[in-house]
Amino acid sequence: MKLYRGFATVGGMTVVSRVLGFVRDILIAAVLGASAISDAFFVAIRVPNMFRRIFAEGAFNAAFVPLYAKHLHEDGETAARAFAARALAGLTAVLVAFVVLAEIAAPWLVMLLAPGFAGDPDKFRLTVMLVRIAMPYLLFMSWVALYTGLLNSLGKFAAAAFAPSLLNVVLIAVLLGLVATGSGEHTAAGVALAWGVAISGLLQVAVVAFAALRAGLRLKLERPQWTSDMKRLLRLAVPGIIAGGMAQISIVIATIVASLEDRVVSWLYYADRIFQLPLGLIGVAVGVVLLPDLSHKLRSGDRAAVVESENRALEFSLLLTVPAAVALYLSAEPIMRVLFERGAFTTIDARASAGMLSALSLGLPAFVVVKSLQPSFFAREDTKTPMLYSGIALAANAVLSIVLFTLLGAPGIALATSLSGWLNAGLLAWALRGRGEFILDGQFRRSFWGIVIASAVMGLGLWGLMALLHPYFDPAYGLLVQIAALALLIGVGISIYFAIATAAGSLKPRTLLKELIGR
């Protein structure tokens, strides 16, 4: 099944990116720790990342891919390429203007994202400077998003999935340079990292543009035109922008609340980095591959194929996400201690980050289910319904973040995020079922219960093994012993899960392997 091969390609490249990201974050933790410089840098890169996800990756692809598929099926390749060129021109014009405005408004953006920084003038000024350096990353990543949509529509996922790794490669190089020069404790470290972010964006554009050129998709940057298809693209993109904005505002709310207490911004960042590994590996891969797949099948009128793709995507998502959530919840502290507890990153930091990771893990299946369900709306050119449900989830998250932070402290912020994710997933599933556009087939129902049973058995095994291995996660035993203990924990957990899932019929290794390699 091409769908699974696409999942494997995007997921595999995402693993490469996430592994490099862990190396990067281990170096950041060792060089900067949970400090004023790290707080400033994390908030600064959140600004362009937030708007990148709002304008480029989320809203733009949700609107662009179905329309590109429509032009390709109804008008031919030449017309589809002309549409893409007009979209590139319009996107560039809007975002150049936006980046200029954001550079001017950087102090207000920092005040919005991290009002707690206002009490420390040096920290606030540093954050504003880093925002201004990193902001062009938004424009570069918007170009990457458009080329990614083109390549994905043609079933070419590798280059676009690899491109994000370049951010980590560049930042690792910068961090190694800081270690060599002993500059990690100076504000120059934050400045160097911010420049690394901007430069990596330009490199990513080069990679995807070259891949598109090899695929015969050469786009010229032309004068923006206000045509009927651009109006349609805008009408679809605006609800997506609002929906994406609401999702990013959830992150803003978490950052705002976290900034009110020292070091919580950094704890949340490190926890989120671990959380993003399974989310990126599974959720992003499913969303990226499923949208063009559904768009093409809907244009072809193959209803049965649409239902099959929706079910297999959700089944694949839960097959990997449910056990990952159980494992992260139980093993959060060993993971944080082994990966980060060294240098400036203390035991207190590791345990605090672990508490936030455990709370985030409760929402992992929900966020992946959202990634699996949203393409069913987008492929049908419906971006308004996800916008509405994102707004409801946002309102719930805003209230819960404040309430749970007051009651539970730092982990309450992460728990609020998880609960709002489940609310969003439930609303999306309810809407699709009500329309009759998503039907759970017998294969999914059988697999689901096997996944739940296998995850529960794995959790019991991990809980017992952690009691035996707990002493060996202490840095006093040395990094090699720590890594060996964590690897044993992970290996046993994976073995238990896959054995039970296979016995229950939820996982069929031979069949899955054949589908992944295309035989």
Image (cartoon, rainbow, N blue to C red):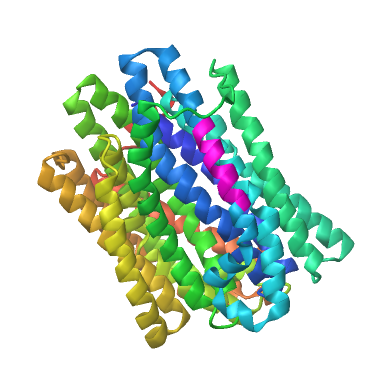
Residue 249 lies within the magenta run: no
Q: Which residue in the rendered view is the most extreme toward the front?
A: 226
Check the picture and name the quadrant holding the C terminus: top left
In the image, is residue 90 above or below residue 17?
above
Front in this rendered view, residue 489 or 303: 303
In the image, is residue 478 above or below residue 98?
below
Q: Is residue 342 visible?
A: no
Q: Position of residue 128 (x, y in %)?
A: 67, 66
Q: Which residue in the rendered view is the most extreme toward the right?
A: 181
- Which residue is found at the position 45% from the left and 57% from the top? 492
Majority SS type along the magenta span: helix
Front in this rendered view, residue 186 or 454: 186
- Which residue is found at the position 26% from the left and 55% from the top? 388
Q: Position of residue 363 (x, y in %)?
A: 35, 63
Chain part drawn in magenta: 89-100
Front in this rendered view, residue 6 or 96: 96
Front in this rendered view, residue 514 or 271: 271
Q: Position of residue 396 (x, y in %)?
A: 30, 70
Q: Is residue 91 left or right of residue 446?
A: right
Q: Is residue 209 visible?
A: yes
Q: Position of residue 390 (x, y in %)?
A: 31, 57
Check the picture and name the quadrant holding the N terminus: top left
- Which residue is found at the position 17% from the left and 27% from the top? 304
Residue 459, picture quadrant: bottom left
| Number of numbered callouts drawn | 0
- Which residue is found at the position 57% from the left and 72% from the top? 111
In the image, is residue 470 above or below residue 56?
below
